[in-house]
Amino acid sequence: MSDMSSTTEIPYADGKILKHTASGVGVITFNNPDKRNAMSLEMWEGFGEALTALRDDAAVRVVILRGGGGKAFVSGADISQFEKTRHNAAASEEYAKRSAAQRALLADYPKPTIACIQGFCLGGGMQVAMLADIRIASHGSQFGIPAAKLGIAYGYDGLRHLVSLVGPSWARLLMYTGMRIDASEALRIGLVERVLPEDQLWGETMAIAETISQNAPLAIKAAKLTIAQVLKDESARDMDAIRAVGTACMDSVDFREGRQAFMEKRKSSRDSDSVASEQNETIQSASACLALRDDGGQTEHAFRKIKFPRPRNTIATS
């Protein structure tokens, strides 16, 4: 696996959010282990800053979210701040507005995201994990939403994602009881995609991320876009966007190289400067490079011209 510690860590929120990159993979670490990575308002805003920096880094193809300390992914909100930030309805509304803005960045993220979950994943941590494209957990992880125990309402977006993953019956059971479930139950009901031993979690997560980072970026974007549209009501789907990104893929240098490699029974190679240059031109000219933002049921389409770096041929190992 890649030696992520060899890259420079950039701190946010007084070091409680950390960002670093390697091998086309960006990593954001929730680093508040004394409180099991409970999220303060400052951490939410630092998280948004780290997401933005990785979004705008052309060398980063995929982003992993993980918790520091080995005991928790994110254990929810920092309850010790409630007297200051959520002591009444007006204060709670301001807190929700500022924290929701950061989650919206993740919900609309243009690059693939993976939640690497070890330990507690509760409350707001569940919201973060559910917004990721892929969730991989270790044995011993625990999941739950204790809103009913705290006397607070879990937001619409969080419940919408919960219902889409586990269905309404399991959503009701989790929300009404505030119960926690273990990793095997989370896998069974569809809350996570894989469960691994703790000593294999990081290595396997990095292997998946590096594999994604070396695949054709426009094809990844097409898949992400199309899946997002599939999840919408039929009347709200943008079929023109789906067709446009499909056309862009068929006209891309990546598709030409991929089919040639298949016919020649060799591994696809996309590492020449000429390939990278042509790929950038294809992506820039394709209006199908689409970012989606869902705002109260209204869909805003903002076309982006995104340059992608040269794909790599091998998965780094140590």
Image (cartoon, helix red, strand yellow):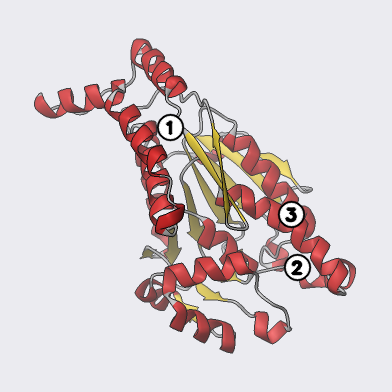
Residue located 74% across and 50% down the image:
45
Q: Earlier in the sequence, mark 2 or mark 3?
A: 3
Q: Earlier in the sequence, mark 2 or mark 1?
A: 2
Above or below, comparing residue 213 to residue 76 in the picture: above
Residue closest to the eye, 158 or 243: 243
Above or below, comparing residue 310 to residue 86 in the picture: above
Residue located 43% across and 55% down the image:
235
Find the residue positioned furthest to the top: 274
Residue 225 - label = none
Task: Tell whether 91 sits left or right of 159.
Answer: right
Residue 96 is situated, as x and y percent measured from the top left of the image, at 75, 63
Task: Tell whether 121 sits left or right of 225.
Answer: right
Q: Earlier in the sequence, mark 3 or mark 1?
A: 3
| CB within 8 Å, label 2 to label 3 | yes
| Quarter that holds the N terminus | top left
Residue 8 is situated, as x and y percent measured from the top left of the image, at 62, 34
Above or below, comparing residue 277 to residue 113 in the picture: above
Residue located 88% across and 73% down the image:
83
Reading the image, the residue beneath label 2 is 78
